[in-house]
Image (tube, helix red, strand yellow):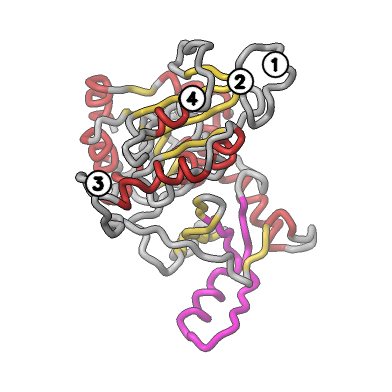
Amino acid sequence: MFGKSVSDLVSSYVNFSYGVNSKGWSKCYCEVCGDGKRTKGPRGGWVFEGDMAFYHCFNCGIDANFDPNREHPFSKEMRNVFDSFGIPSKEYNMVAYASKMTDEKGAPKKPERPAYTIQYFDIPDHFYPLKEAALGNVIAADARKFLREKYALNQDSHEFYLSTGKYVGDDIRQVAHVKALVGRIIIPFFKNGRMIFYQARALNDSSPKKYLNMDVPKTSVIFNMDALYRNMDRPLYVFEGVFDAMHVDGVAVMENNLTSNQIEILNKSPRKKVIVPDRKSDSKKLVQAGIEQGWGVALPEIGSNNKDICEGILRFGKLHVLNSLVKKTYYGQEAKLMSKFV
């Protein structure tokens, strides 16, 4: 059983006699939602790439993926998909963990430690959701206005938080850090629904430090990591800043460069990666790092006086900027050529 691939396993239980669509998805009826009354034809689809599997239903919209090379092989919905198609958990777990349990000769081995680790954290007690803040809360009102006027976003664009500034404990540094979070909008980074990091943005650009970060290493941190394994037929836009990424369900790396761990994490996604550099900043290193990985580059029309797509949207509107983002996306030699204009 250890030698069985995920495509072999799924094919043993799923009827793939309905052919392959134009985008390469092997069609089937979705057993998660029952595919409605099955009057529209098979709406579910599987794609296999090496030892990875991806599932999407165009009826219920479920997205799921499987990669045995990840620390956690199953995406949030993948076990549900396997179970719904009647694939025994014992069998898909054996496929998921076979490489971690045996060496090339099939002999048992100890699991290898991944090259990078991602830590999970609980939401701190002093955080409270922006969307649940009272209308009379002055900081919340300022935060909503700030999102709207600075980034063309609103309180529902992400799971934003504010801080009470109250910390229970004797750690002097932590007490000072929590107090400094008051008057800032807090942006948690999530993976599989759990927090891995946060940034706190000052609501006033005159602040000596615009961002305060969670006091943990961030070399393996990317904003919106769950986007790496959904919408597989669309490009994955990679930004410097989180607010830009929110407009297109993209990811953000927080700097104008990439760490080796971030590159490794991004390359595990089968989606086409596209760097969207800030203008009026030193983004050449970020673009060059992407070019070296064979990724694309996007240079949307945001106006010569604007720095990023948020400013472009405020000036020209979201529809114009996002259409331009798609039209001005380049790959291969074109990407190398256009990168000279950054």
Mark 2 or 3, which is nearer the eye? 3
Q: Which element type, helix, strand or loop, lies under badge 2?
A: loop
Disc 4 residue type?
Trp
Label 2–label 1 contact, CB within 8 A = yes
Disc 2 residue type?
Tyr
Q: CA distance from mark 3 to mark 4?
A: 28 Å
Disc 1 residue type?
Arg
Residue 29's tag is 2
Residue 106's tag is 3
Q: Which residue is mark 4?
A: 46
Q: Earlier in the sequence, mark 2 or mark 1?
A: 2
Label 3–label 1 contact, CB within 8 A = no
Inspect the magenta stretch and tell me whether residue 175 lies in it: yes
Q: Earlier in the sequence, mark 3 or mark 4?
A: 4
Q: Which residue is mark 1?
A: 38
Q: Earlier in the sequence, mark 4 or mark 2?
A: 2
